[in-house]
Amino acid sequence: MRDAHTVEQVRAAEAALMARLPEGALMQQAATGLSTAVADLLGRVYGARVLLLVGSGDNGGDALWAGARLARRGAAVSARLLSPDKTHPAGLAALRAAGGRVVEDDVAALATRPDLAVDGIVGIGGRGGLRPDAAALVAALADADVPVVAVDVPSGVDVDTGRLDGPHVEALATVTFGTHKVAHLVDPAARAAGTVHVVDLGLDLPRADVTALQADDVAALLPVPEPAAHKYTRGLVGVRAGSEQYPGAAVLCVAGAGTGFAGMVRYVGAAADEVRAAHPEVVVGVGQVQAWVVGSGGGDDAAEAVREAAADGVPLVLDADALQHLDAAGSGERLLTPHAGELARLLGVEREEVETDQLGFARRAAEETGAVVLLKGRHTLVAAPDGRVRATTVGPPWLATAGAGDVLAGLCGSLLAAGLDAFDAGSVGSWLHGAAAAHASGGGPIRARDVAAALPTVCRALLG
Ligand SMILES: NC(=O)C1=CN([C@@H]2O[C@H](COP(=O)(O)OP(=O)(O)OC[C@H]3O[C@@H](n4cnc5c(N)ncnc54)[C@H](OP(=O)(O)O)[C@@H]3O)[C@@H](O)[C@H]2O)[C@@H](O)CC1
Ligand SMILES: Nc1ncnc2c1ncn2[C@@H]1O[C@H](COP(=O)(O)OP(=O)(O)O)[C@@H](O)[C@H]1O
Ligand SMILES: [K+]
């Protein structure tokens, strides 16, 4: 499990550890890890030009100490101090002693294009977007195409929410300390962090509310049939999806549901002929199920489909059109699978608001509806009403293709039918969906049906 802790949790754990260690020991560990990661990215340290962006706090201190290490290995290290009167004194002295120099202004900083910049403007102590002087320097570096390695977090992002509240650093990579922070997993900030490396500090941390399942977690949660299982004990998943206008959504939703986690797939809806033709193993017609998936491509019949599914009193996946009929869905186990636009409609806000505060709105929707909310996106978030959130960080941008959401809804429904709760079904389903897309893609384009087809291979690899 990848845990993402809050600033408060990190500060408390760091304080407890620092009380037992010599002064400055943690910063030395951080700077060592940072300089190693920068050296790896540079390939060759000797002769490389490294520019440090140094703010007023310990984040700047980390950058300076790491810069000193790189300078001792032969890099030409210069530092642009954004608060010259408040620069970390020991870090600055170490840099100078190692042969690094301070540049007077942005023009001098960029006079010779740096090979790489180290963003030590602000870390977990930052508030609000970058201030104008820092923003101007960061913009100039972006114009000059200088890759940036962020120290702890890309400066300017909101660490605990993943929001971007103004100008910020767009990093190639981020070297963080002790644990992931929320902004490393939650978009849009996570996008600005690039590849995240964690330097272990040996912190003793509490449970994290924001996490990301890893392959071994998913493998442990997969529903595997008992030796004496038969198709009814494994669970039946019902799909009420598709319409005359969108029969394909039914076919794709059934493809996701029919991956093999449930013992049987039942279909009810307007696309029975298409479903039968594409999936001969599916049973068409009403009957008992352990979970229903409702709404993908559901058109005008969605309200009725939600009402009928809810009448069975089993867990529900509510997708697409069904999301507009939550009042008909009862209050049992429910997994909602909106994209940002659908979540915005559900909450009566603008799509852009959801996109800028994905964690906040996913949590708010879960709290207000009492359902688990799976907010689809680059990093899909699965939020439980109690505030826990799992982010899915696998899945290539090629997955943003029509019908992929229908496959996901069906897959999650099959996991619910097989006995997972809505939080596990949503987060495991989303992880498998992303991993299947990555497998099917191999770096190239994919169709939604390819994602469904790759699911068994991904599961086999996990279980093997
Ligand atoms: N704790 C530990 O054990 C360890 C901590 N470590 C490191 O310390 C970092 C935290 O250091 P920190 O607490 O000094 O805060 P930090 O993020 O450097 O910034 C503070 C100052 O920045 C300013 N400022 C604020 N907002 C701003 C903005 N938008 N734009 C520009 N400036 C802004 C503001 O000062 P002001 O200018 O307002 O006086 C504020 O006081 C942490 O991220 C990690 O890198 C590691 O060494 C491992 C061990
Ligand atoms: N940039 C991206 N990177 C990775 N996955 C993405 C990205 N954008 C969207 N996705 C995923 O693609 C799928 C699109 O689903 P959705 O928007 O419901 O499409 P549709 O309604 O056509 O089925 C979701 O699983 C979403 O998480
Ligand atoms: K930073």
Image (cartoon, rainbow, N blue to C red):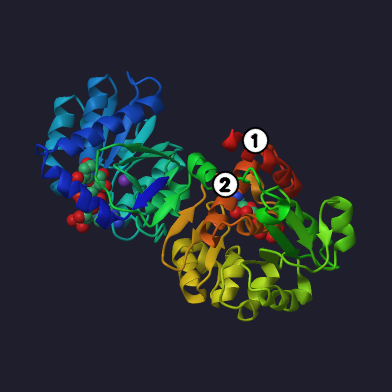
- Whether residue 4 sits left or right of residue 292 in the image: it is left
State the residue at coordinates (48%, 53%). 391
State the residue at coordinates (58%, 37%). 463
* Count of numbered labels shown in the rendering: 2
Looking at the image, is 366 positioned above or below residue 26? below
Q: Are marks 1 and 2 in contact (CB under 8 Å)?
A: no
**Residue 82 visible at all:** no
- Whether residue 9 sits left or right of residue 285 in the image: it is left
> Which amino acid type corresponds to the residue marked 1 in the rendered image?
Gly
Choose the circle earlier in sequence order: 1 or 2: 2
Judged from the image, the secondary structure of the residue bearing numbered disc 1 is: loop
Looking at the image, is 317 positioned above or below residue 380? below
In the image, 431 versus 460, the foreground residue is 460
Image spot of residue 354 (x, y percent):
51, 66
Dot 2 alpha-carbon crowd within 10 angstroms: few under 14, some 14 to 19, many 20 or more: many
Residue 171, located in which quarter of the rendered image? top left
In the image, 67 versus 273, the foreground residue is 273
Residue at which label 1 appears:
443
Image spot of residue 213 (x, y percent):
48, 47
Dot 1 alpha-carbon crowd within 10 angstroms: few under 14, some 14 to 19, many 20 or more: few
Q: Quadrant of the N terminus?
A: top left
Q: Quadrant location of ligand 2?
A: bottom right
Residue at which label 2 appears:
222
In the image, 385 versus 114, the foreground residue is 385
Image spot of residue 199 (x, y percent):
31, 36
- Whether residue 77 sits left or right of residue 283 in the image: it is left
